[in-house]
Image: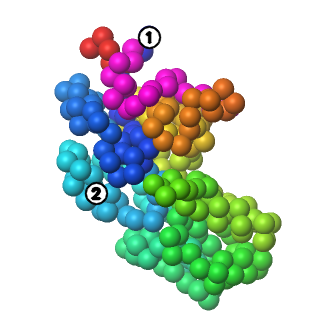
């Protein structure tokens, strides 16, 4: 028997919007969920900007959001660092906005004696940053990351993301990350569950465009999930993947046509 979830967690780019353009029918979908007393959140691995930036962006798109609706790998990173008891000084390979968000949460960039190397989605990446990072790793400093995505899609083509930086550092130091905060790992899910006061994973539904993050997270934590075909993963990828969605949707508004909602 399928029961209506208490919380739907949507990915953003490739799911709710594509190249900054809102998917047709998203506003009606959110209104219908609201009418059904189903909460919704927007969960993103992008750590190049902070949660306030996403709140502003989605508000300008006309979506009915509050800060509670935004769940990012920035918040998950802070939670991860707290739970791992990593000291406050970090060598941060990330944007200034990421560093500023971390500083607001008492984690600070340190280029001389860091307690960990933290990798984010760094649109300001330099050769100097990579050099310093790999040397810290060679000296035994542990490695952590905000999320594992290898590339970020853009209208001009893929952009190197945190996972590509992790791969480069692995090649240079043979060091793997101690922990990763974002999808498909636990910390970003814990942030969402705390915000929405959810205790059971079976009360959640996940929708996104990536088999290797959104759908993997659903499978890993026993959460029903839908792959949407407006982003990274395509229908042909599903058969070849070990990560299997419960539903495959051409576009996110089709969620209302699934047996979870259709009879309501």
Q: Is residue 181 visible?
A: no
Locate the N terminus by quadrant: top left
Q: In the picture shown, does residue 24 fall above or below 70?
A: above
Tag 1 secondary structure: loop
Question: Badge 2 is on which residue?
Answer: 57
Residue drawn at point x = 71 percent, y = 62 percent: 167
Residue drawn at point x = 20 percent, y = 48 percent: 62
- On the image, which quarter does residue 238 sit in? top right
Q: In the picture shown, does residue 7 fall above or below 137?
A: above
Out of 233 and 66, give the one closest to the viewer: 233
Locate the C terminus by quadrant: top left
Cα–Cα gap, marks 2 and 1 = 37 Å
**Which residues fall within the magenta stretch?**
242-259
Foreground disc of the pair 2, 1: 2
Q: Residues within 10 Å of mark 2 (few under 14, many from 20)?
A: few
**Which colour assignment does the render follow?**
rainbow
Out of 201 and 49, give the one closest to the viewer: 49
What number is the disc on residue 1?
Answer: 1
How many numbered circles does the render carry?
Answer: 2
What number is the disc on residue 73?
Answer: none
Q: Position of residue 3 (x, y in %)?
A: 38, 17
Q: In the picture shown, does residue 4 fall above or below 156?
A: above
Q: Position of residue 245 (x, y in %)?
A: 55, 27
Q: Position of residue 117 (x, y in %)?
A: 62, 73
Residue drawn at point x = 22 percent, y = 31 percent: 28
Please check the rendered image and state whether residue 13 is part of the magenta-colored stretch, yes or no: no
């Amino acid at each position: 028997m399928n029961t209506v979830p208490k919380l739907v967690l949507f990915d953003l780019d490739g799911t709710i919007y594509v190249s900054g353009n809102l998917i047709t029918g998203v506003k009606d979908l959110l209104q219908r969920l609201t009418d059904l007393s189903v909460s919704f959140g927007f969960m993103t691995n992008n750590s190049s900007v902070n949660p306030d930036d996403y709140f502003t962006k989605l508000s300008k798109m006309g979506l009915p959001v509050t800060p509670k609706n935004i769940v990012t790998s920035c918040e998950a990173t802070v939670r991860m660092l707290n739970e791992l008891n990593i000291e406050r000084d970090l060598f941060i390979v990330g944007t200034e906005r990421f560093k500023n968000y971390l500083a607001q949460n008492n984690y600070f960039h340190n280029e001389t004696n860091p307690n960990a190397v933290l990798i984010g989605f760094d649109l300001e990446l330099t050769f100097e940053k990579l050099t310093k990072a790999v040397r810290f790793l060679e000296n035994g400093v542990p490695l952590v990351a905000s999320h594992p995505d290898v590339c970020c899609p853009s209208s001009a083509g893929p952009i190197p993301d945190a996972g590509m930086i992790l791969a480069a550092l692995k090649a240079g130091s043979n060091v793997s990350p101690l922990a990763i905060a974002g999808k498909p790992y636990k910390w970003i899910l814990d942030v969402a569950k705390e915000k929405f006061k959810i205790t059971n994973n079976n009360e959640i539904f996940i929708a996104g465009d990536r088999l290797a993050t959104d759908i993997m997270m659903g499978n890993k934590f026993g959460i029903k999930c839908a792959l949407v075909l407006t982003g990274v993963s395509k229908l042909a990828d599903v058969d070849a993947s070990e990560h299997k969605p419960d539903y495959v949707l051409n576009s996110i508004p089709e969620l209302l046509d699934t047996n979870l909602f259709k009879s309501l």
